[in-house]
Image: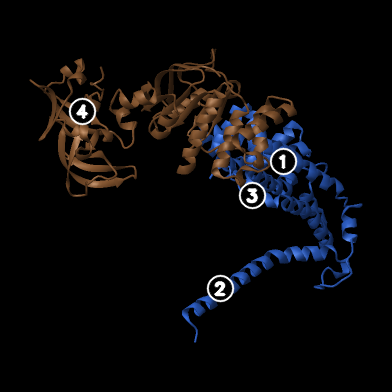
Chain colours: A brown, B blue
Amino acid sequence: MARVVLEKVRKEFNGAEVVHATDLDIKNKEFLVLVGPSGCGKSTTLRMIAGLEEISGGKLYIGDQLVNDVPPKDRDIAMVFQNYALYPHWNVYDNMSFALKLKKMPKAEIYEKVKKAVELLGLEDLLKRKPSQLSGGQRQRVALGRAIVREPQVFLMDEPLSNLDAKLRVQMRAELKKLHNSLQTTTIYVTHDQTEAMTMGDRLVVLNKGRIQQVDTPLLLYNHPNNMFVAGFIGSPAMNFLRCKLIKEQGGFSLINGDLKLNIDKEKVTVKMQGFIQKDVVLGIRPEDIVDADTNGVLNNGSNIVRAEVEVMEPMGSETFVWVQICGRSIIAKAPSNTCASVGKSLRLAVDMSKAHLFDPDTEENISLS
Amino acid sequence: MSTPAGTNRAFKTVYSCLEYLAVAIIVLIFFVPIAWIVLTAFKPSQDVYTLKLFFTPTLANFRAIFSYPLDFGPYLLNSFIVTTATLVIGIPISLFAAYSLSRFKIAGKQGLLFWILSTQFIPPVIIALPFFILFRNLGLLDTRISLIIVNLCIIIPFAIWLIKGFLDGIPTDIEEAALIDGCSRFGVLTRIIVALAKPGILTATVFCFVLSWNEFMFPLILSRQNATTLPVALMLLNAEKGVIWEQMAAAGIVLVIPSVILVLLVRKHFVQGLTLGALD
């Protein structure tokens, strides 16, 4: 168990900077998730921590030790790979005990440690099997077991669940979380799947184009995104964006786009917004904050009611996502599963402007955060 | 009257018969000389020029080639020593080189690879004279060392390319897992890569064995008596009275046997998959 600190850590490939100077302080026992679209530098960052990629600049500490030039084997880390990366020529027991054998640990002790991990992961009957005789889920468990027996200071996981089918992924997600709760080992987890990130991480690091966009707890990221990228990346279905003009009237601030007019709550007005009066801004609103007005008593009485034609309905069982046309843009709204909406018909929607975000269209920065 | 399905089936039968026929012809073409050699090797000398398939087999020809005056024993030993040393030195060197070329960033790697390959473009006879002069100046003419050096020059470029092809197909994350588990680069190579690339390494070994074992021109030019290998020694049987076919055939069998045994031993590895289900 250890703290991991990145100070201005950079990575260049052939002169192109793929990870820009990154500062990150990963606390002891924390489950930190690096999340972002492919090519955002999350795996490269993880591989730099592992020592599999050279660091082009900056300092990396594991525990209190500067490890920039320490080879992977001496960093006291364990890594779980997307493709499991099991040794195909050895059976499960040999795969899991390899690292301990290299440490020249006595055989009896190795046996005890492997046994403990095997019981924890439910692999008792598979010890003599080779990786080719295991299912995807079993292979993933063996890969986890190989990491666990090491009792390392830090676990590094590079998209460990992305090769599993959807059902197994959800199951393993919970198991990994449980495992972390019982082992309390600092874990750095890379994924491109925002649901996985939200559900697993104590804190999330959202990356894009080699830069950290925001580091926060899942809920803070969801409710207070720093910029349009984070707002659009976190949450499923994604946040709706609509370009509007910000105007100031006697009644307060409003957003206008054609016939659409939405009033902004007084308490939502920030100093930054003052600079955008009579200018374009981007309204960001999550699907669950645009609701079928007829089924929502509270918002139905509000002033922010929009009429729009339904394009597509996506029933999810517990709720229904409704695609509508507003100001020429497809917008997703959320309705209860018993909604009266139907394709082609007009629907009254209530917009909860207390949950809305406004973004600077040029810098994409959130200007509605106080 | 045959249905279309029946026609189809008939066509398939004819087709597979033709296939077997073609294979049989090819096998026959390859097999007849070998069969002829085997028969001849066991024939008494008076039967050699007959086409008899039934005769009293004798080991006299084998005895003759391993006793005075032919005495092929030392030549066979030379062949063994030269080939074994070539493989023992050449295959690990090729493996290291192939691994480096497959995994590491090396300035001018493409050029280097082409250069290694280009050594194979040169007809051996062109470099025979330079080698002769080189070894003469070094005092290495008619020594096994000179033959080992020449054989290494022949097999290493070939083995590097062959093994590199196999290594390129092995996913790097297995190596990375081993690096994190506590292996050094050398450990990764000996514990992981050798096991995973076994089919490739064995294939290279067999090909290099055959190249080195059958090499004729260089031993002919570089050796006189002490380092002469078996293929060159076969020439001794082209004597004043003409070719002694029965003994030539016996020596030919002796020459072929090691290759056959080696191929039989490693045959199953040729078909073995590379990653063995480590990933899907």
Whole-number angstrom distance, CA of label 4 to CA of label 2: 76 Å
Q: Chain of mark 4?
A: A
Whole-number angstrom distance, CA of label 2 to CA of label 3: 30 Å
**Mark 2: few/some/many CA within 10 Å (<14, 14-19, 20+):** few
Do the residues at pointers 4 and 2 share their chain?
Answer: no
For the point 74% across and 63% down, the residue is B34
Residue A36: x %, y % from top left: 38, 30
For the point 7% across and 20% down, the residue is A250
Which residue is the site of mark 3? B272
| Amino acid type for the residue under numbered disc 3 | Gln
Q: Chain of mark 1?
A: B
Q: Chain of mark 3?
A: B
Could you say whether the residue bearing mark 3 is in a helix, strand or loop?
loop
Residue A81: x %, y % from top left: 53, 34
Mark whose residue sits in front, 3 or 1: 3
A186 or B211, nearer to the observer: A186
For marks 3 and 1, the one nearer the N-term is 1
Could you say whether the residue bearing mark 4 is in a helix, strand or loop?
helix
Do the residues at pointers 3 and 4 share their chain?
Answer: no
Which residue is the site of mark 1? B87
Mark whose residue sits in front, 3 or 4: 4
Which residue is the site of mark 2? B15
- Viewed as shown, does residue B229 lie left or right of A232? right
A233 or A260, nearer to the observer: A260
Residue B170 in view, yes or no: no
Q: Residue furthest front?
A: A297
| Amino acid type for the residue under numbered disc 4 | Met
Q: Total marks drawn?
A: 4
Quarter-wise, where is residue B159 in the image?
Answer: top right
| Amino acid type for the residue under numbered disc 1 | Leu
